[in-house]
Image (cartoon, grey):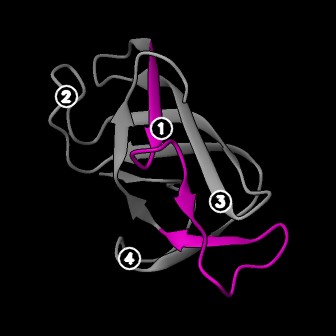
Amino acid sequence: MLTLDIRQPGDIGEPGSYADGPVTGVVNISNVRGLPEGTRLSGYLWTGGEYLVGRYTEAHLSDGRAVPVCIVLGKRGYVEKEDWSKPGAAVVGRSLPAYAVERWP
């Protein structure tokens, strides 16, 4: 489970509004060895079309190291936006399931 962007205000269970661009996420729940809870992730969101696509490419570990990762939002590499989303303002949950992948879907 991953908070999409630490700059987005609100509680974990609330929806957030997102635009295309870089984000800094944080790992809330992890079952991936070497990627503990609290790890910050650098990534990018794309909000065009019916889905929000999120890809995180770098993990910032507590010891100061930055390591490459391939982490996507949702099992298919995207999540559905809420019906009330507007162009340039995709509304989804602030925290969503995220998955480590070997290559981008």
- The reply to whether callout 2 and callout 3 are in contact (CB within 8 Å) is no
Q: Amino acid at mark 3?
A: Tyr
Above or below, comparing residue 85 to residue 30 in the picture = below
- Verify whether residue 70 appears in magenta: yes
Q: 39 or 88, which lies in front?
A: 88
Give the number of the mark in front: 4 or 3.
3
Pick whichever of labels 3 and 1 is earlier in the sequence. Answer: 3
Q: Earlier in the sequence, mark 2 or mark 4?
A: 4
Q: Given contact means CB atoms under 8 Å apart, are the residues at marks 2 and 1 in contact? A: no
Disc 3 target residue = 51
- CA–CA distance between discs 2 and 3? 26 Å
Residues drawn in magenta: 68-93
Tell me where residue 50 appears, x and y as whole percent: 71, 65
Q: CA distance from mark 4 to mark 1?
A: 21 Å
Task: Tell me which residue sits at (78%, 60%) in the image.
Answer: 49
Dot 2 corresponds to which residue? Answer: 32
Are dots 4 and 3 in contact, CB under 8 Å? no
Q: What amino acid is at disc 4?
A: Asp
State the SS at label 2: loop
- Determine whether, in the image, residue 50 is placed left or right of residue 32: right
- Residue 72 numbered mark, or none: 1
Q: CA distance from mark 2 to mark 4?
A: 24 Å
Nearer-N-terminus badge (2/3): 2
Q: CA distance from mark 4 to mark 3?
A: 22 Å
Q: Which residue occupies the foreground of this view, 61 or 104?
A: 104
Label 4 vs 3, first from the N-terminus:
4
Q: Along the horizontal axis of the image, is 46 left or right of 81?
A: right
The amino acid pointed to by label 2 is Val
Callout 3: few (<14), some (14-19), or many (20+) C-alpha neighbours within 10 Å? some
- The residue that mark 4 highlights is 11
